């Protein structure tokens, strides 16, 4: 991806707004990902140069936190918690059911750009184990047989939104 003039302008604005704050690298990466949808290497190296932080450090942060992505993500990001409590309660089977249903692996996106599948660490909702997040929504106490209907709900919402957009046009 080549950075356009307007992208550089947005990045400069984000950097100047947050560069003096504590934890500024994460804030800058978050805001940049919100703008671009993901954090391609070109964006990471621009941030690294501007902040005078080695690219290896910027990339280390991006790859450490599951909220960051170096590849474009689908409309819905599914996070399957593989923390201990969830794992013990069958998270792996739930993950396998999602992989089967969507025909993708972890860190991949469906061909229609609708879902990206991630494996996450504990999200602090162990009482609901096993837990799956879809964007900001949390689904708990899941079994593999719950998966098709949950995914279908998002597919249906997406189609409904699409139809509404077409009607507006
Ligand atoms: S281990 Fe999954 S929410 Fe804590």
Image (tube, helix red, strand yellow):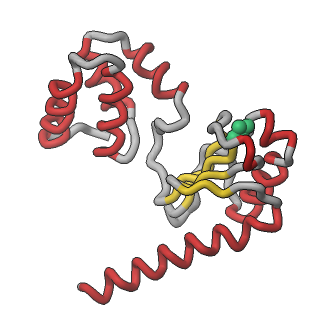
Q: Quadrant of the C terminus?
A: bottom left
141 above or below 32? below
Q: Would residue 122 be found to the left or right of residue 162 on screen?
A: right
* Left or right position of 73 against 46: right
Q: Position of residue 135 (x, y in %)?
A: 51, 54
Residue drawn at point x = 30 percent, y = 29 percent: 28
Which x, y percent locates residue 155? Answer: 56, 73
Q: Quadrant of the N terminus?
A: top left
Q: Residue at x 28, y 45 (%)?
A: 35
- Report whether 55 appears left or right of 111: left
Residue pushed farthest bottom? 167
Residue at left offset 35%, top offset 84%: 164
Q: Residue 39: where, in percent of width, then height? A: 39, 36
The residue at the far front in this view is 127
Q: Is residue 41 above or below residue 54?
A: below
Please tell me which residue is depicted at 56% across the width and 70% down the height of the picture: 154
Q: Position of residue 71 (x, y in %)?
A: 47, 42
Task: Say which quarter of the image contains residue 143.
Answer: bottom right
Left or right: where 31 falls relative to 20: right
Q: Nearer the viewer, residue 18 or 100?
A: 18
Question: What is the total number of numbered labels drawn onto the structure image?
Answer: 0
Q: Quadrant of residue 147?
A: bottom right
Decide which of 37, 152 is in the foreground and name it. Answer: 152
Tell which quarter ligand 1 is in: top right
């Amino acid at each position: 991806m080549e950075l356009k003039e307007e992208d550089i302008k947005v990045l400069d604005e984000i950097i100047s707004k947050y560069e003096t704050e504590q934890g500024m690298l994460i804030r800058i990466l978050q805001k940049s990902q919100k703008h671009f949808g993901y954090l391609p290497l070109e964006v990471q190296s621009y941030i690294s140069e501007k902040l005078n932080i080695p690219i290896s450090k910027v990339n280390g942060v991006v790859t450490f936190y599951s909220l960051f992505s170096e590849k474009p993500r689908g409309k819905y990001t599914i996070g399957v918690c593989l923390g201990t409590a969830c794992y013990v309660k069958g998270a792996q089977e739930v993950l396998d059911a999602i992989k089967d249903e969507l025909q993708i692996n972890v860190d991949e996106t469906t061909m229609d750009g609708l879902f990206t599948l991630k494996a996450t660490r504990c999200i602090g909702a162990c009482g609901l184990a096993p837990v799956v997040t879809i964007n900001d929504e949390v689904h708990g106490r899941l079994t593999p047989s719950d998966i098709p209907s949950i995914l279908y709900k998002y597919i249906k919402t997406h189609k409904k939104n699409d139809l509404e957009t077409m009607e507006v046009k």
